[in-house]
Image (spheres, rainbow, N blue to C red):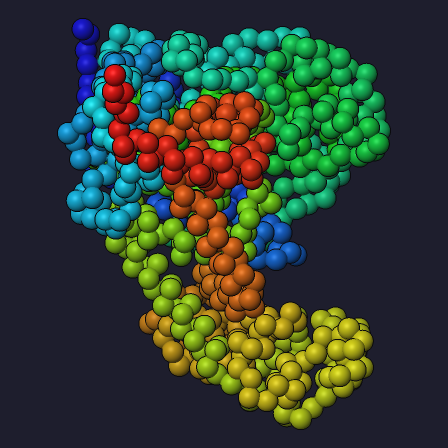
Amino acid sequence: MGFTEEFDVAVVGAGHAGCEAAMAAARMGLKTALITMNLDLIAQMSCNPAIGGIAKGHLVREVDALGGVMGVVADAVGIQFRLLNTSRGPAVWSPRAQCDKAQYRVKMREVLEGQRNLHIKQAEVTDLVLEEVGRDQGSEIRGRVAEDARLVVPTLSAQNAERMGHPADSVEGPGTGEAGTRDQGSGTSEQKRIRKVLGLKLRDGRRLMARATVITTGTFLNGLIHCGEERYPAGRSGEPASVLLGEALRRLGLRTCRLKTGTPPRLDGRTIRWEAFAEQPGDADPTPFSFRTTKIVQPQVSCHIAYTTPRTLEIIRENVGRSAMYSGQIEGVGPRYCPSIEDKIVKFPDKTQHQFFLEPEGLNTHEVYVNGMSTSLPMEVQAEIVRSIPGLEDAEMLRPGYAIEYDAVDATELDRALKVKCMEGLYLAGQINGTSGYEEAACQGLMAGINAALWVKGEAPFTLDRTEGYTGILIDDLISKGTNEPYRMFTSRAEFRLHLRIDNADRRLTAYGRKLGLVDDATWAAYERKQERMAALEKLLKTKKANAIEGPGINHPSRDQGPANGGQGSKIRDQATEDGGLVVPTLSAESAERMGHPVSLVELVKANPGATWAVLLKRPEVTIDRVLPALVNELRSDPLLVDYALISLQHRTSLSHLDDKERHPDIGHPDSILKTEDAVARSVARNEAKAVETEIKFAGYLEQQKKAIEKLKAAEGVRIPEWLDYSVISGLSREMQEKLGRVRPETIGQASRIPGVTPAALGLVHVSIRIQGEKRARGPEVVVA
């Protein structure tokens, strides 16, 4: 045997999933190896140089709340930040950041290299080291083996469950089969043989042995690039595909599929006529991804918006037959929600114009990413398309767009911990599971890394359900339904999206991260301090009666432009626009409301004597921005609330004649984190206040969702034991038997989300759990001659 190294956890692939998996395992105290084919391309942003977006930003926030690193790195190298969907409700607000592509991988490598227990290796993995193993009857945490030898789930003894903080009654008795703590039924001693991954074989002859392995190979498994009629093996442009490992995984007998994704051309920014395009700047007060970020350090830049022309569409229609997508060259299925430009033209023939964005790839490069123009057309056709757009007539194409197809594993082969059901110690995460996007990969990598570490430690797996995060939704969708196209996260996939907001990701998940050892003392202290601040503000709003108006500029619903002079008994006062060109006539509160005009805060207080500010906040036209100025004295006097006092005054134009110290007398307060020049602190404080507003304003809806969540959890509480034999369930159609047998759902709730499984089938399964469990408890029948 050649040179061998030994580790607790090995992670194959250093993309966005691999980085999170390796960091999680190392921070949990395990000796971890991260293997990549190129050390200089760790965390390469191979497509769009951006993090976040609709629903994707939710995933990044959840990764950060659990102790992951994607949000921290994105904040450190972000060159434009935008909070999306703010014209809609808070459930769908989502952060996005344009990042410096080169700095992102440099920063991520810096973070990885600074992590204790983490060892980065440059090598190509060619195969897995396997052995056939039997069930260990004597261990407290056993590998439970299904009768068809397809599923292995760690099982806790009652004693170990209590020792690890789980209730003893979570270890189910005969016939119930708790996932992760499942019963062995009659306790028969037959030995089922399954395979265990012991490590990896490297191309240079080395063996890297590990007790758990996480594979995060992205698009590298048998990757094949297409650019017009040309095609060649590659994992990314200029990087070799992982062919040998792809064949090794196929030999495991896992169900696989072929998927496709693509990327657009990159242009030289020096050859673009920028004045021809509409500028899209970032937010003045950036919203960071990480709850730990206190400052944005990079200079901020703008993106630009452009549109196709009739000539653009004409060129594409004339050449669509040369696209690898339409010539029959590509076998894989592409992403529905990120179609190529030729796909858009073919599928939406009535649309005469398509939007795209010109996005800088970094501060120290002129390379520009053409977001929205993904294509597999020949290079010369791509150049013609680019030059058909006004402003790009002389644009030079630095890199052509291309499509890439690759192997992915059917995610129904995995359990909820992202472990391969028929293997011990093997986890998959990222695009290998059929997802698209950096963010979807990162959250899977984090969960797989956590569970690989827990497996090595002999502890129960850590999972999230659909009520706890978008991460739980993504994993549940994958393992229950699989996917035949690259899976992208959307807020519409969440049943309880008002409960799963970006502002409460830490409240939902940080305690889990702390228990797992991923959240350090400083982060935990900051989290607790934040909860104290928000609780204090909520208490003030719920106890303080709005029977007096204090503070400057509280009349206007959207901007407070002047002090409330003698406002106790006034009508709605004349409000002037900022340019002084319009005066709104005075109305009574009743007339204003009837005519659709916003009512002043003074009149609302007068009309609701004795009401608390929380009661007024439930009205749609009352926002926290209007209420805080009226509470400025209370906010200033409480060290926990002083930052909310500052944001309530920061944007008041009526105070613009005062200097900084007069306008913000609390600057320099020892309990204040907020400085006038600190845009991030302003944004954080404002978002905290809005989170409190959301909890108050939507309390009724949130209570309804809590009741619905309890019902869903009740369905999830009915566990399906892995020994259940679907083939003998009377009345269950062959179609239902095949679907349930292929996925092998862990709960009735998961079974209900398998496409095509009917309520009647669920009823039969529910009854059969008891019937088959009773038979197993009695043991085999004895026939007397």
- Looking at the rendering, which quadrant does residue 785 occupy? top left
* Percent x, y of residue 689: 49, 67
In the image, is 592 to the left or to the right of 142? right
Q: Residue furthest front?
A: 785
* Percent x, y of residue 668: 38, 72
Closest to the observer, 311 or 321: 321
Residue 42 vs 175, above or below: the answer is above
Closest to the observer, 91 or 269: 91
The answer, for residue 577, to whether it is visible in the render is yes
Q: Residue furthest left?
A: 138
Residue 150 vs 558, above or below: the answer is above
In the image, is 391 to the left or to the right of 632? right
* Percent x, y of residue 380: 71, 14
- Looking at the rendering, which quadrant does residue 453 occupy? top left
Residue 252 vs 107, above or below: the answer is above
Closest to the observer, 718 or 677: 718
Which residue is at 53% across, 42% downward? 56
